Each structure stands twice: as structure tokens, then as C-alpha cells.
Image: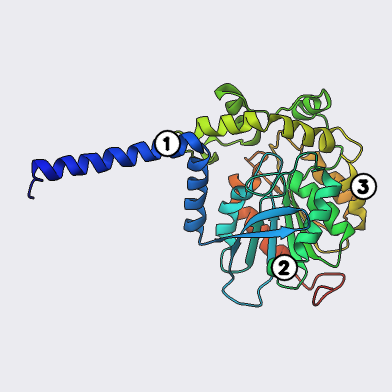
Amino acid sequence: MALLSPRKARIANGIAAAILVAMALALWLDPGLVLRGEFAKQRMRLGATSQQTVVDDHRWTWVELKADKPDAPTIVMLHGYTGSKENWYRMARALRGRYRIVIPDLPGWGQSERRDGADYGYVAQSARVAAFLRKPDVSGGRPVVLVGHSMGGGIAALAAARYPNLVARIGLLDAAGVRFEDNVFGKDVLDGKNPFGVSDEASLERYLATVFHNRETRPWAPWPATGIYIAQRKRDAAFEQGVLDRIGRGDERFLPGAEAANISQPALLLWCRLDKVVDPSAMGLYAARIPHASQVMLEDCGHMSLMERPGESAEAVAMLIERGLPAGPQGELP
């Protein structure tokens, strides 16, 4: 292998130094670049495409995975509190090809738009989801399979109950929105705290230990993403607290469970037995309101069923889709 001449070596070293300076400057101007870059890499590995759609007063960012067959059902997946669309990637990989999959960042979260003073509680978000589903490029012009996790499950339950013409089937994974049995998380919320708050490495570890039962299932973060993530969560603290005040302590905190009695579509309830956030007793409360729902209890996992047991969670959703024809209105969306 030929060595570079001194002149070419100086040029190469200069180019390398310039690249490093440019990278450092880019990170200084936009620290979130590392996280977005990692998320983009995950999206490309999944084979999904990134989309943006303006619905009423918010810009939505979402990803789409095409199905092998053009007439396959569309699954729309809604993430939970402090979450983002990336939480669904492991489960989406297990469903890839069989169904068309749409995964948005809910308004206010992730890369979707957040507006000062806007309401991001269950009622407002379920109305936004309904407007999102009315977009032909989102739904394909047909009722969708709506799957929600945690806070996203409460939003999905309310959307299915209030807008049944838009939702063919409904899946609730570790869903919030009912008065489950007391646990440490719930007591902290009622005391006005944010048990999901992250401000340093210790609180990040506490947050991850709360939502994940199995350490090996936690998402991997490349350096220096951990520090950038902590800084982002510190900036978001007031927003997170405002949302939690509404969905965890406000008048509408149990509205999804109350209105779940109006859900007539085929339904799935899925929980992890070791959920420290939404106690598994919540599944029974939802089942009392949706007696026709299938119930799946997974062992050896915590709150993040979609990440800790993505294969089994995906198969439960596939079973929901494949069993019979959905109840309620069918055909094209109005």
C-alpha cells in the first residue's frame, strides 16, 4: 500500500480536521442532530419512509411502511407519554409486509409540532387523531386498525368510542385512562409529581427502570446521545408536567375508560404482568367496559410491552386483524 506524499498527507489531515470542526459546530448549533440521526438510521433499517402532514393547526411527522399487498389493512400506532414513534419500530418490524403501518409522533411530541398554550389532553388529542385519520394519505380512505400504548392507548380508546366510522379495530396496550389499583407511580402522579421526569443520569436510570422490566430490552443510545436526551427532557419538563396534570390528575383522566363502553369494534387488551406504570388491574377495568375484547397478559415484562415483547405483541395485533369482519360501519371513509 503506497504512502501519501507529505503534501497529500497535509491535505488529508486538513480535510479531516475541517470535517471534525464542522461536525462539532453542527452539534453545538443543533444538539438534537445526534438523536435525529440515530432515529433516521433506525427508520431506514426498518424500511420506512418519513412523511409530514399538516392537519388543522398542527404539523404531524409520521413514518409509513408499505404492505406487500395494496389492499392490506392499515395499522396506525399511537405512542405513550414522553414517547415517540420510534418506540414502535421493534413491533412494526414483526408486522412488516403483512400490513400497511403508519406511526406518527403525536402533536406536541417527537418531531411533530408543539404549540404554546395548546391542549394535549385526551379529548383534544383524540379529536386531532380523528382529523389525522380522515386524511386519505394516512388511512388509505378506509377505517384503520388503531393501536395505542399507555397515554396513546387512552387517546385511541376515546377515538374509537367517539369516531367509530374511522376505526375498524382497536388495540390497547398497557393503556392509561382508568382508575387502576394504587402503585408507586400512580401515587406520585396524584401527589403532583412527574415520576417520568428526567434531569440527570440518576433520574434517567430511575425512569428506565420504571418503564422497562428487562434491562437488556432498553434502547441503545450512541455517545453523546444520553447527555443530549437528558438536556432535551429538562427543556421539556414544563410541557410534560402540563400534560400529566391533564391526563393524570385532571377531570378527563378517566374519560377513556368511561367512554370505552361505546367501543363496539373488535378489540384487544394487552398488558405486561409486571407493569409498574399502568397497573395490570387496568386491563380488567377496560374489559368490564369492552366485554367482547380479547385479553392477553404477557409475563416477564414491564410497561413497554411493545419493546420488551414486540413479537408476541405483534402477533396479538395480527390475530385481532385476522379474526372475522369488524363490527360497525365499513367501506370508504365519509
Q: Secondary structure at mark 2?
A: helix
Residue depth check, mark 1 versus mark 3: number of the one nearer the observer: 1
Task: Judge from the rendering whether residue 126 lies leftward or rightward of residue 98; answer left or right.
Answer: right
Decide: few, some or many residues near mark 3? Use Cα within 10 Å; few <14, some 14-19, many ≥20: some
Give the Cα separation between the discs numbered 1 and 2.
Answer: 41 Å
Going by the numbered disc 2, the residue's amino acid type is: Ser
Residue 232 drawn at (x, y percent): 60, 33
Mark 1 or mark 2, earlier in chain: 1
15 or 120: nearer the viewer? 15
Q: Which residue is mark 2?
A: 139
Mark 2 touches mark 3? (CB < 8 Å): no
Mark 1 touches mark 3? (CB < 8 Å): no
Q: Secondary structure at mark 1?
A: helix
Q: Which residue is mark 3?
A: 258
The answer to whether residue 180 is seen in the rendering is no
Going by the numbered disc 1, the residue's amino acid type is: Leu
241 or 258: nearer the viewer? 241
Task: Judge from the rendering whether residue 69 lies leftward or rightward of residue 6; answer left or right.
Answer: right
Mark 1 or mark 3, earlier in chain: 1
Residue 209 drawn at (x, y percent): 61, 30
